[in-house]
Amino acid sequence: MTGETFERIRDHLVVDVWSDVMCPFCYMGDALLARALEQFPHKDDVEVHYHSFLLMPELSSDTPIDLNELLAAKRGFPREQAAAMNEQIAARGREVGLEYRFDRVLAVSTRTAHELSHFAAAHGKQHEMVQRLFQAYFTDGLNVADHQVLADLATGVGLDRDATLAALASGRFADAVDADVEQARQMGISGVPFFVFAGKYAVSGAQPVEVFGQALETSWNETVGTAAGAGR
């Protein structure tokens, strides 16, 4: 959440994550971090905060594009090559229990989806909301720029539909998205996912579970664990 990046919470470890809903490796990285947390003895004292990053800020909110066509147009890949690359990602995703349906993906601006993430954070539902947005984009083939679709997704994680629609219509969290994007620029973050543990240790990309586990252990021992020891 904006204004809380790298905050210190007594007896808690904070993991700040920059990601984008349309980033397949962000979805994968989130799942791998979750697996590492399941094995972490202090998992109940870890808070994960998500921050916005826009991989393709130029995309329209009004006109979804077939993903393979987008890759062909933006990256210069032949459609067949784009499909083959996506299948490789899907295969890796299946290894961590994720279903990627790239044939369904609707490439569209994710700015409004990020606004929803911040709205959810204000109501203590950000993690669930981000996970649902990933699934909506990569598995369900939903338009994550459509306010009605987003309101349905928000309702599914326990948020009020009318309040969600009002927040999105007002643009109340647009500044929060812009602040996250600007902070990423200032930090030199050029790709996502990007994880910062306890405001000190950075991990870039969808790394193996063991890498996230080591980052959790090291950052815990050098921040929360040290503070706890000093208090005895």
Image (cartoon, rainbow, N blue to C red):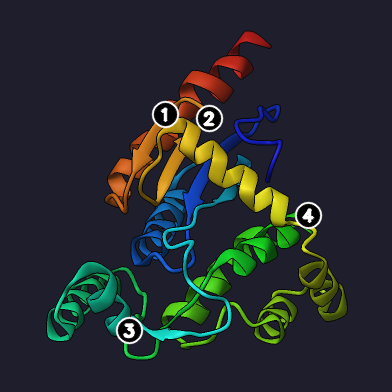
Residue under the point 34% across and 61% down? 25
Residue nearer the viewer, 8 or 179: 179
Residue under the point 68% across and 46% down? 1
Left of 87 or right of it: where is 49?
right
Residue under the point 70% across and 81% down? 147
Please name which of the two marks, 4 or 3, marks the residue nearer to the observer. Answer: 3
| Label 2 or label 3, whichever comes before in sequence order | 3
Q: Which mark is residue 102?
A: 3
Residue nearer the viewer, 97 or 78: 78
- Tag 2–tag 3 contact (CB < 8 Å): no
Secondary structure of residue under mark 4: helix
| Label 4 or label 2, whichever comes before in sequence order | 4
Secondary structure of residue under mark 3: loop
Residue designated by label 2 = 198
Q: CA distance from mark 4 to mark 1?
A: 26 Å
Q: CA distance from mark 1 to mark 3?
A: 33 Å
Left of 164 or right of it: where is 105?
left
Residue designated by label 4 = 122
Q: Position of residue 56 (x, y in %)?
A: 43, 63
| Label 4 or label 1, whichever comes before in sequence order | 4
Q: Does 169 sit above or below residue 17?
A: below
Please name which of the two marks, 2 or 3, marks the residue nearer to the observer. Answer: 3
Circle 2 crowding by C-alpha within 10 Å: few under 14, some 14–19, many from 20: many
Q: Position of residue 8 (x, y in %)?
A: 66, 27
Please name which of the two marks, 4 or 2, marks the residue nearer to the observer. Answer: 4
Disc 3 residue type? Phe
Instruction: State the count of labels.
Output: 4
Q: Quadrant of residue 91?
A: bottom left
Residue designated by label 1 = 201
- Tag 1–tag 2 contact (CB < 8 Å): yes
- Tag 4–tag 2 contact (CB < 8 Å): no
Q: Does 143 sit above or below residue 37?
A: below
